[in-house]
Image: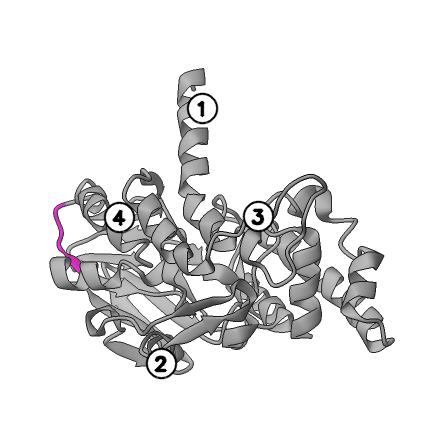
Amino acid sequence: MHSHEVTRRSFLRQASWAGAALFFAPRAFARPIQQPGIEPNTAAPADRLQQFRTAGATTPIQVTKLRDTLFLLQGVGGNMVAQTGPDGKLLIDSSAATAASRLKDTLGTLGPHPMKLLVNTHWHFDHTDGNAALHDNSGAFIMAHENTRNRMATAQEIAFFHLKLPPSPTSALPQETFIDKEKLFINNDEIDLVYMPDAHTDTDIYIHFVGGNVLHCGDVFFNGFYPFIDASTGGTVNGMIRGADACLAVADDKTKVVPGHGPLGDKDALQKYRDMLATVATSIEKLKSGGQSLDQVIAAKPTAGFDADWGKGALKPEQFVELVYTTL
């Protein structure tokens, strides 16, 4: 591989995480960590959705072939997976509304088949903002867990970000929902949709392409950095661990494991992530059950052994400790 190709791919990977950085930027956290000599960013949290959409209008979409008919798409917001075939195209998650035309063009390069089905991994806007455009302009039928439709259909608040969101338009809402699991047979593959309760939110599912051996874990899996857990809409660290276990149970050593954010992973990467979550949660639970306050637990630095590997994202170790502490 030529060096300029490596540089370009590195750039695209960084660009593909721009939406995640906007959503998970530390400035809007409940307990902002201010560095000496640096003024805290006072931009209104309400601008976050607009910033995300602004990035969506310009961020390129990187395509990585996973299997003959399965492709990883990384643009603004959460990672997407597209399946192509004679039954039509299936897409997991929808990026930003402003990325819809670029997304349509990108999908067009993967084959001539029309867009048929959109599946949402959960309700957060960095995974669902493009729903209406894909439904209205490309004819996508939308599926998700029933809680995703319920969340999207009503006003929501993500308290950790001081972020309030209005209901989504009707055309963005899932048209078919399920409670525990759903099995589809599309383009000569079995596709299992399975609910993971009280994990990143109370709306999370994984999507397993059984024949293609590709697993999209949604935001139950953040590959390479500490994850956000949305306590305002039912997220818990123990649910995240159970969700990771559920994903591990259907993966093997050849499974392409797609995280909600971060680079493509495999079973080993998912296992390391799960073990990090479990170790940190156990340490914090012991401190909390021993009567230590949040400030005391943060001061104890229970993530110190993992920070070098997992503390490189927008979520700082102190903020991750708060998320775990408050959801135990």
Residue 253 position in % (x across, y down): 54, 50
Residue 294, compared with residue 180, is above or below; it is above
Closer to the chain start, of discs 1 and 4, is 1
Q: Are marks 1 and 4 in contact (CB under 8 Å)?
A: no
- The reply, left or right, for residue 182 in relation to residue 268 is left
The residue under label 2 is 150
Closer to the chain start, of discs 1 and 2, is 1
The residue under label 1 is 6
Task: For marks 4 and 3, give the CA distance.
Answer: 23 Å
Q: Nearer the viewer, residue 205 or 32?
A: 32
Q: Are marks 2 and 3 in contact (CB under 8 Å)?
A: no
- The reply, left or right, for residue 273 in relation to residue 103 is right
At x 34%, y 65%, the residue is 120
**Circle 4: residue type:** Ala
Q: Residues within 10 Å of mark 1 (few under 14, many from 20)?
A: few
Q: Which residues are magenta?
A: 112-116
Q: Secondary structure at mark 2?
A: helix
